[in-house]
């Protein structure tokens, strides 16, 4: 940590405070992501229902051609 503090041009105390601040920000971001996770899962399921995966691109091409 002393080397990092010197490299960043600050005291050891300032380096530690900066690391703690970064960790606190990351912890808040993780909590925010966890809070939105159920909503995102629901949205993903809705999209999957509306747009099922099709492995055969031939069917997609035919569907597009026939819609014209």
Image (spheres, helix red, strand yellow):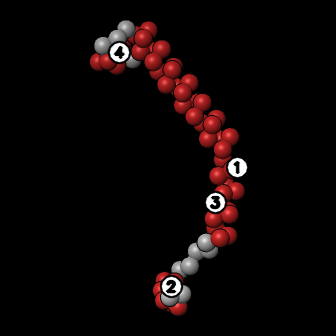
Q: Nearer the viewer, mark 1 or mark 2?
A: 2
* Location of mark 3 (residue): 44
Query: Which comes sooner in the sequence, label 4 or label 3?
Result: 4
Query: Which comes sooner in the sequence, label 1 or label 4?
Result: 4
Dot 4 surroundings within 10 Å: few (below 14), some, or many (20 or more)? some
Task: Using the image, tell me which numbered label, if any, was put on residue 64.
Answer: 2
Q: Nearer the viewer, mark 2 or mark 3?
A: 2
Cα separation, mark 1 vs mark 3, equals 10 Å
Query: Which comes sooner in the sequence, label 2 or label 4?
Result: 4
Q: Position of residue 39 (x, y in %)?
A: 69, 50
Q: Does residue 12 show up?
A: yes
Establish if 10 lies above or below 61: above
Establish if 5 lies above or below 66: above
Q: For residue 13, what is the image quadrant?
A: top left
Dot 3 surroundings within 10 Å: few (below 14), some, or many (20 or more)? few
The answer to the question of whether label 2 and label 4 lie on touching residues, with beta carbons closer than 8 A, is no
* Location of mark 1 (residue): 38
């Amino acid at each position: 940590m002393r080397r990092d503090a010197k490299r960043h041009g600050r005291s050891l105390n300032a380096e530690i405070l900066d690391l703690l601040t970064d960790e606190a920000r990351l912890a808040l971001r993780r909590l925010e992501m966890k809070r939105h996770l159920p909503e995102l899962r629901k949205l993903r399921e809705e999209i999957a229902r509306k747009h099922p995966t099709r492995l055969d691109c031939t069917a997609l091409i035919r569907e597009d051609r026939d819609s014209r």
